[in-house]
Amino acid sequence: MSLFALPPIPDVPVRGEAEAYPVRRIFCVGRNYAAHAAEMGNEVDREAPFYFTKSPAHLVLSGAELPFPPGTEDYHHEMEFVVALGAPLFRGTPDQAARSIYGYACGLDMTRRDLQGAAKDKRRPWSLGKDVEGSALIGEITRATDFGAVADQAITLKVNGALRQDANLSELIHKVPDVIAHLSGYYHLGPGDLIYTGTPAGVGAVQAGDVLEGAIAGLTPIRLTLGAPD
Ligand code: MN
């Protein structure tokens, strides 16, 4: 028995499956598309990816209608390709990493850009900028065997019908098996771990009332509606 009941972390639906995917942890890759790194004024480190994390409690499913978050005047969309792991991996090779993948989904890494920027300036952690309540949106997972190879699939985001991000998974600097293998040097990865693989160029601010629609070829599209602040 626990002392009190907590809000549940949503399980993620899987295309064609009756059972959903439970989530344990959320890892996010920074600056994994050159054009996005450039638009943020950063150099790309091609040697190794870097990461931040989001609380699993901040995961929300596609279709959510959420209040505009507190504490920001520059809330940004980051459309991302999400990898869902299905097998344990520790200090794995890229080949082993590829075999640890359960499936893929569309995701949004919503970001208080003003607070992230202030944290960068002061060499402080990004938590207030990145680990925002409701900031990890995810869509239905497609099993890796159904999706096929990660190749040159289009990745797009529209805000109120206007195209804001339009790129291609072939632009990923650190490829999916390399990211997973690298991360497995620091964590005992396993089922329930999600990896948001970074956003392409075109990030920008959204407002209360906006409707965000993300898509990646071969995956179920996602949708997020932002309401008035609460
Ligand atoms: Mn991101």
Image (cartoon, rainbow, N blue to C red):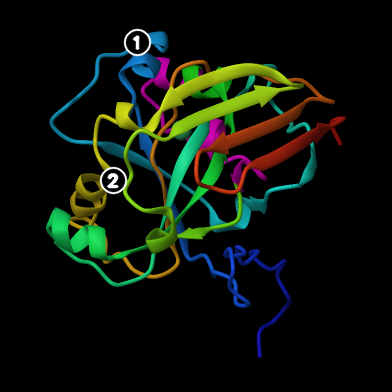
Q: Hey, what amino acid is under mark 2?
A: Val
Residue occupying the point 17% across, 27% down: 46
Is residue 127 highlighted in magenta? Answer: yes
Q: Is residue 112 above or below residue 108?
A: above
- Quadrant for residue 8, please give it: bottom right
Determine which of the numbered discs, if any, sits on residue 88 in the image.
Answer: none
Residue where numbered disc 2 is placed: 176
Distance from disc 1 to disc 2, alpha carbons, whole Å, reads 21 Å
Q: Residue at x 39, y 59 (%)?
A: 144
Left/right placement of residue 148 relative to residue 106 reads: left
Q: Is residue 228 above or below residue 99?
A: above
Circles 1 and 2, Cβ within 8 Å, touching? The answer is no
Q: Which residue is mark 1?
A: 38
Location of residue 130 with respect to 91 vertically, above or below: above
| Dot 2 alpha-carbon crowd within 10 angstroms: few under 14, some 14 to 19, many 20 or more | many
Question: Which corner quadrant of the image does residue 15 belong to?
Answer: bottom right
User: Disc 1 on helix, strand or loop?
Assistant: helix
- Left or right of residue 59: residue 123: left
**Callout 1: few (<14), some (14-19), or many (20+) C-alpha neighbours within 10 Å?**
few
Quarter holding the N terminus is bottom right
Percent of width and height locating residue 98: 24, 58
Does mark 1 have its CB less than 8 Å from ligand 1? Answer: no
Q: Earlier in the sequence, mark 1 or mark 2?
A: 1
Q: Position of residue 157 (x, y in %)?
A: 60, 27
Residue at the (23%, 67%) spot, across then down: 89
Q: Is residue 109 visible?
A: no
Label 2: which secondary element: helix
Residue 204 x %, y %:
59, 16
Quadrant in which residue 114 is drawn = top right
Look at the picture and state if 70 lies above or below 53: above
* Range of residues picked out in magenta: 118-137
